[in-house]
Image (spheres, rainbow, N blue to C red):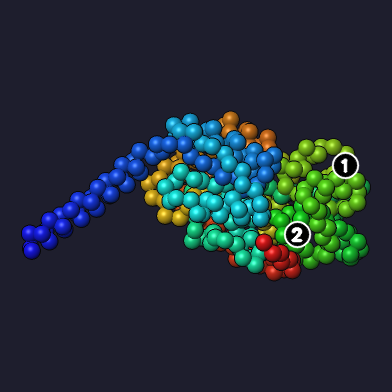
Amino acid sequence: MRKTSLKVLGRVLIACLSVVSAQAFAQANFPTKPLRLIAPFPAGGSSDGLARLLAPELAKKLGQSVIIENKPGAGGNIGLDAVAKSEPDGYTIGLASPGPTVVNITLMDAIPYDPVKDLTPIALVADLPILLVVNSATPARTVTELIAAEKLNPGKFFFASAGNGTTMHLSGELFNTMAGTKLQHVAYKGTAPAIADLLAGQVQVGFLDLSSVGGHIGGNKIRVLAVGSSKRISSLPDVATIAESGVPNYQLSGWFGIVTSAGVAPAIVQKLNQSLVEIVAMPQVQERMKAIGLEPMSSTSEQFGQFIKDEIPRWAKLIEISGVKSKP
């Protein structure tokens, strides 16, 4: 009986060692097959453009194809849910942004995944600057002048955004709170109609991302007053931040990062992180990012994870201030 027990124990140990060896081999040789990069927004936007920029460079680094899969819907939730529910082997990665990662968990009544528990952060890769712009017919030429003009004419200034609960909308609400203004929000169904009405003078003010409004900078229809980022951006070095322009400590911008499912081995996460950090540091990649209105950035996996944890309550406070609440 004892010999039989020892034999069974021996087989169990061998099986366990085999599994451990197989896992170690898989991690050491990752990747051995193509990866999926899920972009949770439709083709044609800044997120899709970034995905198409990163995928071929990541393929070169890893020696395997990186196939882009667009899974739009529910404010980005469908795409990130697919990442969260994928096998924890590192072969499915996703493009994360504020909406489905740190905003929707508060903005919506329910989302099908927990951004902190069900996703593994790999790296931040890009910042999406938000610009404070005005129609050129608006007399204000500085942030201070805009604040003063609004306070002299309360309720007479309107700001455009790409929709309720978007980064642009909440940027305006944060501005109102910190500057003591009451700019009236006008929600559009997307950035294009918001820009169209701003150019036409139907609204005086816009909080719009650089990738969308950049093509109009330098024309005679709009004027850039400031950028919402924590520091000036390289593509517009002469444009001051909102914080520098009379609203101390103001900081809000969009961003993009890469995530995978929970439970992926640290060695695989580290390999993906290192590859992305090296890619973002490449001059040609930085140049192409700036061409689509993005500012390159990078981080460790741990830094990105802490960033997400810090951003969730920050956006929750903005959502409370704005009074916006939508259903999935």
Q: Amino acid at mark 1?
A: Lys
Q: What secondary structure is marked by label 1? A: loop
N-terminal-most mark, 1 or 2: 2
- Circle 1 residue: 221
Q: Is residue 242 above or below residue 92?
A: below
Does residue 98 show up?
no
Please name which of the two marks, 1 or 2, marks the residue nearer to the observer: 2
Residue 126 in the image: state x and y as whole percent: 60, 44
Does residue 8 show up?
yes
The label on residue 138 is none
Q: In terms of depth relative to the viewer, which is nearer, 68 or 290?
A: 68
Residue 207 in the image: state x and y as whole percent: 77, 52
Q: Amino acid at mark 2?
A: Asn
Q: On the picture, is 228 further left or further right than 18?
A: right
Residue pictured at 8% horizontal, 63% vertical: 1
Which quarter of the figure has residue 324?
Answer: bottom right
- Circle 2 residue: 164
Residue 136 in the image: state x and y as whole percent: 89, 45
Q: On the picture, is 12 further left or further right than 97?
A: left
